[in-house]
Amino acid sequence: MHLNRREFLRAARLVGGAAMLGGPGLVACDGGSARATNVPRLPLPPDSVLAHPATECPIDTVVIVMMENRSFDHYLGWLGGEEHYVEEGRRRYGRNFHVDARVDERYRNEFGIQVETRHTLQLGDDPSPYRGCNHRDPGHSWIKGRVQRDRGFLASGTGNDSFAASYYLSEDIPVNAHIARRFTVMDRHHASLLGPTFPNRQYLFSAQSEGLKTSLHPLDFGQYSSRTIFEKLESAGVQAAEYFTNLPISLLWGARMFPFVRTVDVYFSDAAAGTLPQVSFITPPVGGAFRPDDHPQGDIALGQRFIEALYARAATTGTTSASSDFESRRCLHRRTPDPGTSITISTTTRRSSASSSGDFSARPRRAPARKATDGSWPSATDTPTTTAPASG
């Protein structure tokens, strides 16, 4: 697939501006809203590798999809109170099993009033609770993230309101709930940066943001220069590709990325043919009225269907590990660890700074990351003990 710079810029303009920033003009809120529970389920094939033990299905294909702007407790907080899930975990892994998840939190707002977190569908102030169209896009800029950390999650200047302090239940997100129960949940998985969308997506592809704290607008072909994971994998003899819908993020690194770029329809045909590269990154549609990337004001029912389609197709390849991640993950509610709490994850960076506004090592919020492989333990949590230092 070959996309010239003019075509790339045209795509970037279509998803840019207010839609990319999630501002009042976000076109995703035009039209109606589907109920996530009414999204048709895509059955796994009877010979799916997910029904076999890992010893019979060694993993040689990894699929990663990064969604948008949802935190761990906002999506998976209900797991902590699901008695069967916890009991099953203790039966399998011992009495010390637990998942760090909860939905019952309180935050002090800008007027000093304690506000309890609530089920999103019970807020009662939005005809589209699966989208949050009557609410502000929760604050997830570099500055707002630090205001949330330093002054409180609902303080003045955070950009947050009652939607940001709300949560969904398992019946609202049936696909994510099934994956969480059946496979492995990572309850200590944090975003790369306490910052906005594109610096975090830079970390996904190149383990750094080149010192950038904001998403560049307008987006431009070749605006980043760091070496990418695609190139490093290629040098190690490992095939890799980005499958995109309307905006190939990897082309922000320029023409040298053309060999790694494919459209998402090719993902489905490659998976069906068993010819997926060893490492595949899926970029969901960005912006637009029917965005399925889980960005607030987009319909999460579409996100559920998108994730299920990717997982179901990956499961037919025979040797696949599928992982769901979220990028701008600081914006929706999550408990901030008390001072002294041990969080076994390294955020070391060459751009650490004593200045809050310039510090790249600030710990972001947790993401509702899930890992589905033939060897994934059901009803399991995965707490990472180390991470590679970020390069800034």
Image (cartoon, rainbow, N blue to C red):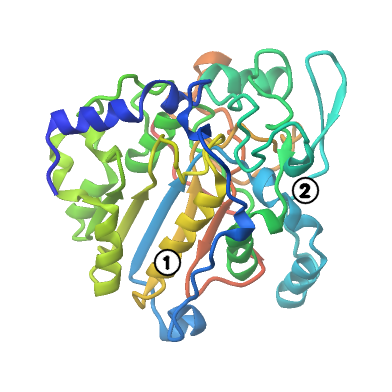
Considering only order in the chain, which callout, 2 or 1, is on the residue closer to the N terminus? 2
The amino acid type, in three-letter code, at marker 2 is: Arg
| Relative image position of residue 293 (x, y in whole percent) | 47, 44
| Relative image position of residue 367 (x, y in whole percent) | 58, 44
Q: Secondary structure at mark 2?
A: loop
Q: Is residue 340 above or below residue 53?
A: above
Left of 155 or right of it: where is 315?
Answer: left
Residue that badge 1 annotates: 321
The amino acid type, in three-letter code, at marker 1 is: Ser
Q: CA distance from mark 1 to mark 2?
A: 27 Å
Residue that badge 2 annotates: 102
Left of 28 or right of it: where is 356?
Answer: right
* Near-viewer residue (226 or 123): 123
| Relative image position of residue 220 (x, y in whole percent) | 24, 25
Left of 173 or right of it: where is 207?
Answer: left
Residue 157, image quadrant? top right
- Could one spot residue 20 in this view of the protein? yes
Residue 84, image quadrant? bottom right
